[in-house]
Image: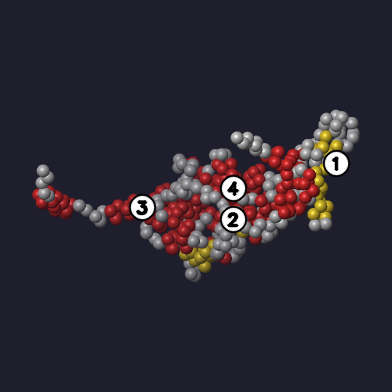
Amino acid sequence: MQTKKPALTDTALLFYLLGESGEDRMKGTVRVKEKCPNCGLAFEHVKKLGYVCRSCKTTPKKYYLDLNWNGKRIRLFCDKTGQALDSYQRALNLQATIQHEIDSHTFDSSRYVKAELVKFWASTLLDRFLEVKLQVVAPSYKNDYRRYITSHKDFFKTADVRELRKIDIVNYAQTLQQKNLSGKTIKNIVDNFKTFLSWLKNDLEILQVVPPFPKIETQPYAFTWLESGDQIHALSLVEERDRDIVAFLMLHGCRPGEARALKVKDIDIKRQTITISSTFSGNVIRNRRKGRGARPSIVPIHPEMVDFFIERCNNHPEAFIFINHRTGGHYASRSFLRIWERARAKGGLPESLRLYDATRHSVGSQLANQNVSSFIISKILGHSSVKMTERYMHENIDGLRSGIDKITLKDNIREIGTVTKTVTKASPSRK
């Protein structure tokens, strides 16, 4: 009967491979710089066991791999993750890994030399990414960008971006879910990290491909909107000197930042049109509309505001259309929001009802419920695609009712009873 030989453990197998014949073929040697902290003597290398001071029985705290490769001497003090070689076993593991990479012609010293490795750390490159993006993103979005980058750095830290795989992204998303963040917030954070990796690929050419990203489930965006009569009531709650700009938003559906940025030069009284080409982001005016690649949008002046624009357009072309009479200048971001907050409190309206809901969302929803085409609504609201407009296609109960009222059973009740009776008589009896 044959006795089954015990299987080698991972450690034993490693030491076996690093025996006499194994070490001869290795391209590097594990070494130490430090000396025994007790006696000051050099540590002695005991084969397969490591370095030790025979008299004090102490071992080193730091190791390095002395490597000769392609005629160059390379000393490695950490692995790919930046982890210091703080044990003989860790140094041996690195030695075996490098030998395998050399044999398979995949070895790249920059992935191990710390001075080079730092260049590819996620934290290092995320700082560069943030510096670049803060120069081009909208001012109102900068704080979000900073939060996203901080989140990325907290998770990926010194990970080599060249080594990132789909599983790393999945683990990141799962970590975010454990923080009880909303699906939308998680999606924004993960999408931002995807933008970062795309920047590494397209701009810095560090990555050859961006790893696949998991799909983040989000709840459909639900917003509040007002019927016309409720809008009129809400407008009556606004102080009279501020009603012009709020009425403009309720009739034209543009974004508050775009209304605040409107100037006399943007109004064509003859053609009765408005060109929306600028917006405020926070309190910084930008000569472009919100959205990637958004083009200027031309919309008609609502008939109820033609006289207002005729009066305002007697000013200098660079003058703002809507003036905050408290300051004599344009409406600032925070002071403009306070106008709506005061009106909402005065009328006892719910705090969840935002100015955006009472204006832009209400315009889109009302037009959709009056069967205006998605294409026309998208042009009025300045959407870059009709898909964005589909959010306003709510269930129009009145429209559904008018549709379902077109069918009836009243005139068919008698025939249904007759048919049923006839079929019953014609059925053969069962014995």
From the image, tell me which residue sits under label 3: 396
- Give SS at disc 3: loop
Residue count near mark 4 (Cα–Cα under 10 Å), binned few <14, some 14–19, many ≥20:
few
Distance CA(mark 1)–CA(mark 4): 38 Å
- 4 or 2: mark nearer the eye: 4
Q: Position of residue 135 (x, y in %)?
A: 67, 56
Q: Is residue 298 visible?
A: yes
Q: Earlier in the sequence, mark 3 or mark 4?
A: 4
Residue pictured at 52% horizontal, 64% vertical:
297
Inspect the image, locate mark 4, and give the three-letter code of the amino acid beneath it: Ile
- 1 or 2: mark nearer the eye: 1
Q: Quadrant of residue 83?
A: top right
Q: Is residue 241 above or below residue 292?
A: above
Q: Position of residue 153 (x, y in %)?
A: 67, 46
Residue pictured at 22% horizontal, 53% vertical:
408
- Give SS at disc 4: helix
Q: Is residue 400 left or right of residue 137?
A: left
From the image, tell me which residue sits under label 1: 33
From the image, tell me which residue sits under label 4: 167
Inspect the image, locate mark 2, and give the three-letter code of the amino acid beneath it: Phe
Q: Is residue 138 visible?
A: no
Question: How was the colour assigned to the protein in this rendering?
Answer: secondary structure
From the image, tell me which residue sits under label 2: 280
Q: Position of residue 291 (x, y in %)?
A: 56, 58
Q: Earlier in the sequence, mark 1 or mark 2?
A: 1
